[in-house]
Amino acid sequence: MAHNIYLYILVAAAVSFLIRVLPLTLIRKKIKNRFIRSFLYYVPYVTLAVMTFPAIITAPQVPAAGILALIVGVAAAWKGVNMVGIAALCCGVVFICETVAAYLIP
């Protein structure tokens, strides 16, 4: 069976295009249903969370460092720290945790 990379790329592009275009062409009037509107309002946040949270825990070499960084990041966000500050703080937490773990675990 021959693998044609161009066919795979074409199919992926078509599916991606249809996912973006079909809602625009099928739904032309304003959505009045409160449930659907609230559902669509939260979709970007849920999508971001689903993509981000597993990476936070699995990206560091020590999973506990990721969990601790997540806790520190949530606390910093709760206090009103901006996104750049939260990112820097979380990176620092992971760096410190992994450095300590490197000295403790031979």
Image (cartoon, rainbow, N blue to C red):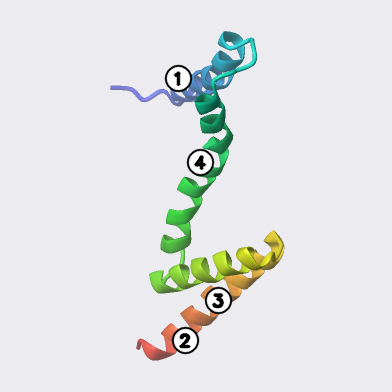
Q: Amino acid at mark 3?
A: Val
Tell me how far mark 3 sits from mark 1, CA to CA.
44 Å
Tell me how far mark 1 sits from mark 2, CA to CA.
49 Å
- For the point 55% across and 38% down, which residue is it? 42
Tell me how far mark 2 sits from mark 4, CA to CA.
33 Å
Q: Amino acid at mark 1?
A: Leu
- For the point 63% across and 63% down, which residue is it? 77
- Mark 2 and mark 3 lie on one chain; the one further toward the N terminus is 3
- The numbered disc on residue 67 is none
Q: Amino acid at mark 2?
A: Val
Tell me how far mark 1 sits from mark 4, CA to CA.
28 Å
Mark 1 nearby-residue class (10 Å; few <14, some 14–19, many ≥20): few
- Up the image or down, 24 lies above or below 86; here it is above
Q: Nearer the viewer, residue 76 or 95?
A: 76
- Mark 1 and mark 4 lie on one chain; the one further toward the N terminus is 1
- The numbered disc on residue 93 is 3
- Mark 3 and mark 1 lie on one chain; the one further toward the N terminus is 1
- Mark 3 and mark 4 lie on one chain; the one further toward the N terminus is 4
- For the point 50% across and 27% down, which residue is it? 35
- Up the image or down, 104 lies above or below 77; here it is below
- The residue that disc 4 covers is 47
| CB contact under 8 Å: marks 1 and 2 | no
- The numbered disc on residue 100 is 2
Name the residue furthest left: 1
Image location (x, y in percent) of residue 49 = 50, 49
> Is residue 78 shown left or right of residue 105?
right
Image location (x, y in percent) of residue 54 = 42, 55
- Up the image or down, 34 lies above or below 28; here it is below
- Name the mark nearer the viewer: 3 or 1: 3
Image location (x, y in percent) of residue 69 = 51, 70
- The residue that disc 1 covers is 7
Mark 2 nearby-residue class (10 Å; few <14, some 14–19, many ≥20): few
